[in-house]
Amino acid sequence: MGIRFLLFFFLFSLPGIMCKESPDVTIIVRGSDLAAETNDEFVCATIDWWPPQKCNYNQCPWGKASVFNLDLNHTFLANAIQAFNPLRIRVGGSLQDKVVYGVENLGYPCEPISKVAGELFGFSKGCLSMARWDKLNLYSKRQEQL
């Protein structure tokens, strides 16, 4: 019994024994290396992942403005991109970490994002089909040529 108590006491005390006072640490970041540069005319817009079911305060503004359903053939979109030339379009947003791509070896059906209570942001993981990816990619390449 005595040896068990001593072993228990030793193991219980070990974290306190091993813990040493940590000195303050100073980290210096040298920001002299330029990673990228933009000019005064830089314009960027984001196409987000929100599905039409995304609503706030009984307003559902996303409609068909998502990566999944944006009408890439609408002349208004093409005209807006040309008007803001040179415009950079970012595909991303809050749900980007919940998006998988429908590649051949995905291993399960490529299902869209759907509303799910209790999930992060209230939506499930979703899949962007390769057909939709190809359309977005082709659209981007066409806009670069204008």
Image (cartoon, rainbow, N blue to C red):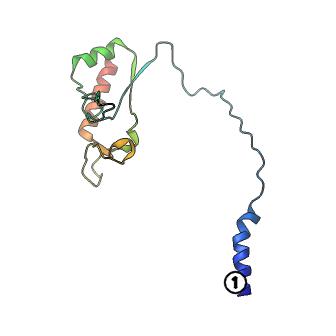
Q: Residue at x 69, y 83 (%)?
A: 4
Of 49 and 9, the residue lying toward us? 9
Query: Split into 4 quadrants, where in the image is the C terminus?
Result: top left
Residue 50, position as x, y percentages in the image: 32, 34
Q: Residue at x 34, y 21 (%)?
A: 144
| Residue 99 in picture, x, y percent from top left | 35, 43
Residue 21 vs residue 12, the one in the foreground: 12
- The residue drawn where x is 74% and y is 40% is 26
Q: Quadrant of residue 73?
A: top left
> In the displayed structure, does residue 119 sit left or right of residue 76?
right
Quarter of the N terminus within the rendering:
bottom right
Q: Position of residue 37 (x, y in %)?
A: 54, 21
User: In this figure, which residue is indicated by the disc labeled 1?
Assistant: 4
Residue positioned most to the bottom = 1
Q: Quadrant of residue 56?
A: top left
Residue 118: image x %, image y %?
Answer: 36, 48
Q: Nearer the viewer, residue 18 or 77?
A: 18
In the image, is residue 109 above or below residue 31?
A: below
Label tally: 1
